[in-house]
Amino acid sequence: MCGIAGSYQFGSGPVPVDDRINNALRCLAHRGPDDEGVYRNGRTVLGHRRLSVIDTSPAAHQPFTDDGGRFTIAFNGEAFNYQELRAELEAEGHRFRSQSDTEVVLRHFTLKGEGFLHELNGFFALAIRDAEKDELLIARDRFGEKPLWYCEQDGRLLFASELRALEALGAKGELDPHSLHQYFTFHYIPAPWSVLKGVRKLEPGELIRVNAKGLERSRWYDVVGAAKRTETSSDPRGRLRELLDDSVRLRLNCDVPIGAFLSGGLDSSIVSALAARHRTGLRTFSIGYAGAPYFDETRYAEDAARHIGSDHTSIRLSTDDLAAGYSDFLTSVDEPFADSSALPAFILAREARKHVTVALSGDGADELFGGYRKHQAQLRLSDPRSMDKAVIALRPLWRLLPKSRNNRITDMFRKLDRFATNAGGSNEQRWLNLADQDPDDDAKRLVPHPVSPLALREREHRLSRGVKGLHGI
């Protein structure tokens, strides 16, 4: 994990030289404790904080400028296939002065322009300055794994890996009540919006072209379009196994200690097992809760670790340990985020960092493979059987019964009511209903500022637009 920040001045006039970029980089020091660099030229200022993972030498210092001096990159992320890309270029006669993936990424840009993004197998947020044209390209990876915030203010484009760094660059904004409403509804604030008016998150698969006239935003990758172009395998199980193994293998390529988070569940166990095939003595880490055996899954993680032969560490937290972690955790979060696993995951990462620099995890597998109850509900509602039809028919009854997460019976009534309620409507509306974490609409009572129902509907439409291009589950 690295951090980037920077600015581009529109119009004419000298670019102000001040400490704002340095202040922003101080805000990002926890993302990149190993090195810091600043580039100033023309209208552009680029800053970088580095966590050294590939080529830990000074030769990979960023921002990185090519040998001709025309192009300069600030890169947060990793190109997992950089060795293959480098070998192809070397076969054509290209030479490199570092062993870093950053230099390979920049070289591909100089040769292919924006099309180089499609060559990258990885996660990233990057900014590349073209000194000859005095232009800037900013891009985010296909699925938005690496963050990037931006805004236009006082005749400049400001961007950074975190909101606090953006504010250090000079971004200002009032609380956005519509974003606050979305937070209370979905328990997070979806991109492209943020908690502040005028501050945006670059969306997954998006890029921004910046020049003196302004900025132009476009999408370089679209998951729906990509899915339509993907060939169907005659052996989908075998193909999936190959893809998972290859993706884990690629992510193990680094010059620092690497491990894996292992909960003992399907997702992290599969990732850890594949990693153990490619790296002997793999370090794995799990977190549990002392005094709360119902929530403590470390025994499953320890069983999985013995099976795959990893060097395992179980970290058991008390209630006091969790409470002690709140302050640091809240400091690390830029805007409200209500995932109940975020605090223990933060503590797990902090403890694992004492042993490894990089860790793999199974995060995202439930979304990709349909692991949540909402996916089950969609599957059953698309082809309801007799029991499902009975639950739907009894909707008036579920509406009357008490519903709460506080005990098993009332929670069952809550789930049955939600299932029956979502039986009708379009896939788009059903997706929104199932993503809604607060169906009782407490958001209306919790947001102290007036909001526009039309603006909220427009946001919901934009949020769910991808559903229209997909089918079924």
Image (cartoon, rainbow, N blue to C red):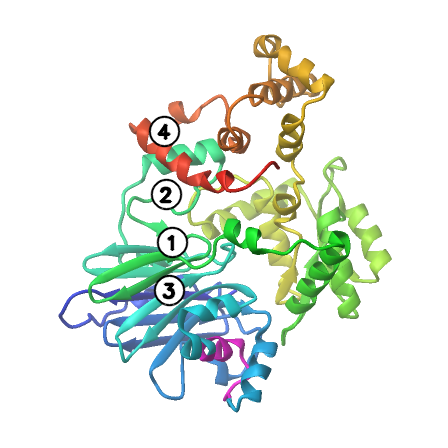
Query: Circle 1 — which element?
Result: helix
| Left or right placement of residue 287 versus residue 86 in this view | right
Q: Which residues are magenta?
A: 96-107
Q: Are marks 1 and 2 in contact (CB under 8 Å)?
A: yes
Residue 434: % across, % down: 55, 30
Disc nearer the start of the sequence (3/4): 3
Amino acid type, callout 3 = Ile
Residue 389: % across, % down: 67, 16
Q: CA distance from mark 1 to mark 2?
A: 10 Å
Amino acid type, callout 2 = Val
Quadrant containing the C terminus in the rendered view: top right
- Please tell me the numbered disc located at residue 447: 4
Residue at point 35%, 67% (across, down):
137
Judging by the rendered image, the residue that carries numbered circle 1 is 163
Disc nearer the start of the sequence (4/2): 2
- Please tell me the numbered disc located at residue 291: none
Which of discs 2 and 3 lies nearer the camera? The answer is 3
Judging by the rendered image, the residue that carries numbered circle 2 is 195
Q: Along the line of sight, which residue is nearer the eye, 242 or 22?
A: 242
Judging by the rendered image, the residue that carries numbered circle 3 is 138
| Left or right placement of residue 83 versus residue 161 in this view | right
